[in-house]
Image (cartoon, rainbow, N blue to C red):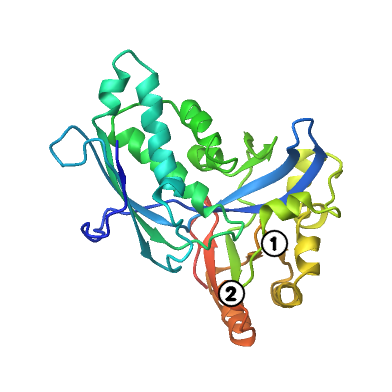
């Protein structure tokens, strides 16, 4: 069935859902596994900020979508320059096709039903590509959840998580929708029964990129961080935790090192998230985060922008 990227489609409307994003409050590599992947210990802190999706889906011909997967990107806080050149490389397209293929193979009449399933997906882009915030994974997860509902599939969360893990290691945590400890390659989740470790986070989005594959292959990457007790590590994540990719990235980019040092000076803490180059710090309030972010933005041309987001699940707080 065709996968289309038709720019003549109608513009986005108002039924948006936020996909969210994540911070790795710490990211340790415990060892390299026999299969070549790395065993991780990390904590995914979900944030209430991210790409937005509007999804129209149908089963049948009444909407003209039968068998068609249509995807559009629109600029939000980010432009659309990170969009894949081919529709088949778009993670949203891959997620929709994977879910439809699952329908095709999961029941005797699955093939007939799958051929009738279609969707028009509109993405409003807010997350930087390659920033370490899991924006693409979050959008793919939100799409799986939306299509599961709109196509009336009623698949359980565990089944969607298994499907999402084949799209990316970060997808399952967004399907689950809860901040969580993670092991394996980041796909073995254990939700932690703790309050959000901070209410607000300031995130810096620099004009600097890093390549995940190169970092994992780096000869100086620390691959033998001892496994720590979860409760102790969570309670002391700022002092006992680290991001093992951060020293490698900062050593290669003096500008990013300057941004890191300025954020640490002003906020009392700074850390890189994931294998990207975005930097973050917990802040006491949205207003404090905005103030620090504006100050750094004015002083550093390499900082493209910043945002302040609430930790998912945090209680409502005053902006002061």
| Vertical position of residue 155 compared to residue 276: above or below | above
Q: Position of residue 191 (x, y in %)?
A: 61, 37
Res. 93 image quadrant: top left
| Residue that mark 1 sits on | 272
The residue depicted at 58 percent of the width and 74 percent of the height is 288
| Closer to the camera in the image, 115 or 299 | 115
Q: Is residue 274 visible?
A: no
Q: Position of residue 316 (x, y in %)?
A: 48, 58
Q: Position of residue 58 (x, y in %)?
A: 22, 37
Alpha-carbon distance for marks 1 and 2?
20 Å
Q: Is residue 124 visible?
A: yes
| Vertical position of residue 223 compared to residue 83: above or below | above
| Residue that mark 2 sits on | 288
Secondary structure at badge 2 equals helix
Of pointers 1 and 2, the one earlier in the residue sequence: 1
Secondary structure at badge 1 equals strand
The residue depicted at 39 percent of the width and 36 percent of the height is 97
Res. 298 image quadrant: bottom right
Whether pointer 1 and pointer 2 mark residues with C-beta atoms closer than 8 Å, the reply is no
Q: Position of residue 167 (x, y in %)?
A: 52, 39
Which quadrant is home to the N terminus?
top left
The residue depicted at 22 percent of the width and 60 percent of the height is 8
| Closer to the camera in the image, 219 or 162 | 219
- Badge 1 crowding class, 10 Å Cα cut-off, few under 14, some 14 to 19, many 20 or more, is many
| Closer to the camera in the image, 22 or 312 | 22
Nearest-to-viewer mark from 1 and 2: 1
């Amino acid at each position: 069935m065709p996968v289309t990227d038709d720019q003549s489609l109608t513009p986005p409307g108002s039924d948006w859902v936020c996909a969210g994003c994540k911070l790795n409050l710490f990211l340790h590599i415990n060892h390299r596994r026999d299969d070549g992947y790395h065993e991780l210990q990390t904590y995914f802190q979900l944030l209430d900020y991210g790409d937005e999706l509007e999804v129209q889906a149908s089963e049948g011909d009444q909407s003209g979508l039968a068998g068609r997967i249509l995807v559009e990107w629109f600029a939000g806080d980010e432009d659309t320059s990170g969009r894949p050149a081919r529709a088949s490389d778009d993670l949203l397209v891959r997620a929709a096709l994977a879910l439809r293929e699952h329908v095709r193979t999961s029941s005797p009449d699955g093939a007939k039903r799958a051929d009738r399933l279609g969707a028009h997906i509109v993405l409003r882009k807010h997350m930087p590509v390659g920033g370490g915030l899991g924006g693409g994974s979050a959008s793919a997860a939100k799409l799986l959840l939306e299509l599961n509902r709109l196509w009336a599939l009623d698949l359980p969360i565990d089944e969607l998580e298994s499907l999402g893990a084949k799209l990316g290691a970060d997808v399952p945590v967004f399907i689950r929708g809860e901040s969580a400890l993670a092991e394996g390659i980041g796909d073995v989740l254990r939700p932690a029964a703790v309050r959000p470790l901070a209410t607000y986070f300031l995130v810096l989005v620099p004009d600097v990129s890093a390549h995940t594959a190169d970092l994992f292959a780096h000869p100086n990457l620390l691959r033998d961080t001892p496994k720590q007790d979860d409760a102790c590590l969570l309670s002391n994540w700022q002092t006992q935790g680290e991001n093992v990719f951060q020293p490698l990235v900062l050593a290669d980019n003096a500008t990013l090192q300057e941004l890191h040092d300025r954020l640490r000076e002003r906020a009392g803490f700074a850390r890189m998230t994931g294998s990207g180059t975005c930097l973050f710090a917990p802040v006491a309030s949205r207003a404090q985060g905005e103030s620090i972010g504006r100050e750094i933005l004015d002083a550093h041309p390499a900082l493209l922008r910043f945002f302040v987001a609430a930790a998912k699940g945090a209680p409502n707080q005053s902006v002061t």
